[in-house]
Image: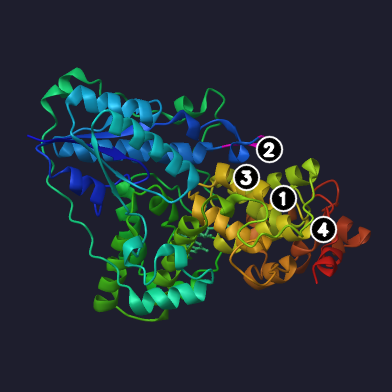
Amino acid sequence: MTTALVWFRRDLRLHDNEALATAAAADSLLPVYVVDPREYGERPYGGRDSFRFEKTGAHRARFRCESLSDLRASLRERDSELVVREGLPEDVLPELARAVGADVVSMHTWPTPEERGVEAAVKARLREAGVEIRRKWGHTLYHINDLPTPYTDISDTYTSFRKAVERDASVREQVNTPTLPPLPDAVDAVDVGSVPTPVALLGGDVSPTDADERGVLPFEGGESAALARVESYVWDADRLREYKQTRNGLLGEGYSSKFSPWLNEGCLSPRYVHDEVRRYEELRVENDSTYWLLFELIWRDFFQFQAAKHGGTLFTRPGIRGRHDIDWRTDERAFERWAAGETGIPFVDANMRELNETAFMSNRGRQNVASFLANNLRLDWRRGAAYFETRLVDYDPCSNYGNWAYIAGVGNDSRDRYFNIVKQARKYDTDAEYVTHWLPELDPLPPEFAHEPWTLSRDEQAEYGVELGVDYPEPMVDLEQSYQKLR
Ligand SMILES: Cc1cc2nc3c(=O)[nH]c(=O)nc-3n(C[C@H](O)[C@H](O)[C@H](O)COP(=O)(O)OP(=O)(O)OC[C@H]3O[C@@H](n4cnc5c(N)ncnc54)[C@H](O)[C@@H]3O)c2cc1C
């Protein structure tokens, strides 16, 4: 008789879950989730006291709690259970393994330093207790063992990486959802615990996280909501056929898939998305849009494998390119204006306000606000990335720090790249519909002024009833001058 314990981490799903399927081969199985207090509250960046930031904001905490409730409900439907414990996984897991007499603990592994650190501690403690450990890789489209080269040798350039995997690797089949064995007999002695609330996770002063109706989606956590989103985006609304044309949008639920929060919390497997795209191609249409969704999932893989390759260097200020030559500034007030969406540059402010209100921002928005902080303001890019870490409902360490480093010129792009914010605003928000959606104070302005209110004369300000410095901030930098410095 074998007893297994499956440790759910950021893999809160039953479908295509190899850690679960492996554990389900045992005669009895105890599914466990551990609420690790190190993931909540204020922490020093990188463990050292460089600057402090909140690890998890209210929206992601809510999303996680909903995901846990959904997982527990699905397990209960299968006569199983999700035991939820608060504490350090390295303490909790050996204790539970002992309580139910588990021989083996099955888990997924991630490539990032914090996750690896926890995992190493868990492994050491389980070994001491004589419990076998089975680790699985399960959050990318391509499996790490199927890459054309060892991950340590992958290209640091996206295009070469993509071409190599497209040519020489294939996406594995999904792992079937297993029939679950019964709970261990000794489960009666185990307190199953309750799924935490966001307030319990974050402390008493959490602000309410009711969905802001101006947001793109309410983003309900959980595998059920994830599968429903795939169904609605791909099949019901039939948006996949035009994804490549719409993906740079800013408003509404349909311009892009919005799969990211579910992918990152593990409620959705990228291989499931892949298989749905292939099914859609067979049944409806195969075109550049269907390909492009997979192209973007390969970006996601790229940053995961980059993190595996470069480890903690990805999170350092000079980054993987060792850029010690950039003179990063410290200016708390400037950082706060950026974070609050009060820079006086409408396209930046609208995006930051969307992030602050809803925990989401489009890819186009992310690129521009990151470029503004790192390039125009030259503030330490890691401050911006850490702010995103707190706020984003879809935060993922590899995608977040990888994209930030890329834009800040310390990451995977060998060119120094910056965005011309006003040009971008005019191109992607021609009628200023997006900026006025989030900055209603600019509503009275014609679109050309809504993107550049600083070009209004005093008389024009009076005519439109928008006074700079009163109704909306003066710009905190002269954009043109800051571009001159970068050229
Ligand atoms: C500064 C910055 C920070 C970012 N931080 C994160 C983050 O913490 N978590 C995160 O998931 N994405 C991050 N991204 C990438 C991208 O903005 C989001 O994945 C995307 O906006 C999510 O919306 P979607 O699911 O509708 O994307 P879609 O356009 O529908 O794309 C489908 C999927 O492809 C993946 N993807 C798309 N673009 C990228 C990309 N550039 N890098 C990695 N994966 C990508 C995502 O998993 C996404 O869900 C960041 C981008 C920038 C520029």
| Residue on which disc 2 sits | 51
Precedes in sequence: disc 2 or disc 1: 2
The local crowd at label 3, few if under 14, some if 14 to 19, many if 20 or more residues have their Cα within 10 Å, is: some
Nearer the observer, 240 or 121? 121
The local crowd at label 2, few if under 14, some if 14 to 19, many if 20 or more residues have their Cα within 10 Å, is: few
Identify the magenta region. 49-54
| Residue on which disc 4 sits | 464
Q: Residue at left 25%, top 33%?
A: 82
What's the distance in space between the residues labelled 2 and 3, CA to CA? Answer: 11 Å
Instruction: Report helix, strand or loop for mark 2.
Output: loop
Precedes in sequence: disc 2 or disc 4: 2
Q: Amino acid at mark 3?
A: Tyr
Depth-wise, is mark 3 or mark 1 nearer the camera? 1
Precedes in sequence: disc 1 or disc 4: 1
Q: Amino acid at mark 1?
A: Asp
Residue lying at the far left of the rendered structure: 1
Nearer the observer, 467 or 59? 59
| Residue on which disc 1 sits | 380
Is residue 456 something one can see in this rendering?
yes
Q: Residue at left 15%, top 49%?
A: 178
Determine the image quadrant of residue 451: bottom right
The local crowd at label 1, few if under 14, some if 14 to 19, many if 20 or more residues have their Cα within 10 Å, is: many
